[in-house]
Image (cartoon, helix red, strand yellow):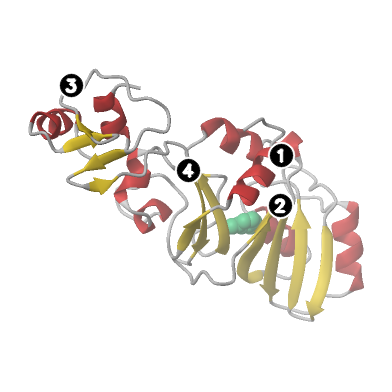
Amino acid sequence: MRLDKLLTNLGVASRSGCKEILKAGRVKVNGETKKDGAWAVPEDAKVFLDGKQLDTRLSRHLMLHKPAGVLTAREDNKQKTVMDLLPGAYHALGCMPVGRLDKDTTGILILTTDGELAHRLIAPQRHVDKVYEASVEGALDESDVIAFEKGIPLKDFTAMPAKLEILSPEKGRVTVQEGKYHQVKRMFGARGKPVVALHRLSFGPLQLDEGLLPGEYRELTKEEEAALYRAAAMEK
Ligand code: URA
């Protein structure tokens, strides 16, 4: 990739800003000052800006502990989004959320720069397990477990069979494979037990890192990244 494009994609500055930075001799690659933006950067090159090494990976995958009160969207004119919880470099790299959690839902949200990966992970035919803990009004009982297992009829579709474990009368852990709009809330709602709080514990092979406080994120480990690509039946 051209050096100026790499710097722009990494969010160093705008295209013209990067040109200026290069002209000023502020960029060194493998120990040599490079001023030519068109120069092709070799794979694994060590790129420094003002003496500080840049992380040149263009592909990134994150786990965010989504807090309540933020939208799952790339941007919004009025409301805070999950992207506002990440440093600008991730915006420049084109990071996007995989699927959607409601504004008041908390828990694990994956973000990636790989659009194909995101697309495949949320495709209904992919059947990626998502595990939620739901606090409800009313008391859950065995009839709910059976109804979830059979598939709950909703207004516009019948939900696929889901596993419900009762943790306490007001709390259930549910595993679903679909991800339709308000799906989990609608399933409990159809049983007359409206959800008052919803938290996602896992997405496919990945569990929420308990060390992450609401609003915090971290990059996935190599193993987690590989597991996610496997879940999407994709080669890395
Ligand atoms: N189901 C819901 O109802 N809401 C979410 O945020 C996720 C799944």
Frontmost residue, 216 versus 171: 216
Three-letter residue code for mark 4:
Arg
Frontmost residue, 109 versus 150: 109
Is residue 20 found left or right of 165 in the rendered image? left
Precedes in sequence: disc 4 or disc 3:
3
Q: Is residue 180 above or below residue 70?
A: above
Say which residue label 3 marks: 36
The answer to the question of whether label 2 and label 1 lie on touching residues, with beta carbons closer than 8 A, is yes
- The kind of secondary structure element at disc 1 is helix
The residues tagged by marks 1 and 3 sit, at their Cα atoms, a distance apart of 40 Å
Q: Residue at x 44, y 47 (%)?
A: 73
- The kind of secondary structure element at disc 4 is loop
The residues tagged by marks 2 and 4 sit, at their Cα atoms, a distance apart of 17 Å
The answer to the question of whether label 4 and label 1 lie on touching residues, with beta carbons closer than 8 A, is no
Quadrant location, ligand no. 1? bottom right
- The kind of secondary structure element at disc 2 is loop
Q: Which mark is residue 205?
A: 2
Mark 2 is surrounded, within 10 Å at the Cα level, by few (under 14), some (14 to 19) or many (20 or more) other residues, namely some
The location of residue 197, given as percent across then percent down, is 60, 71
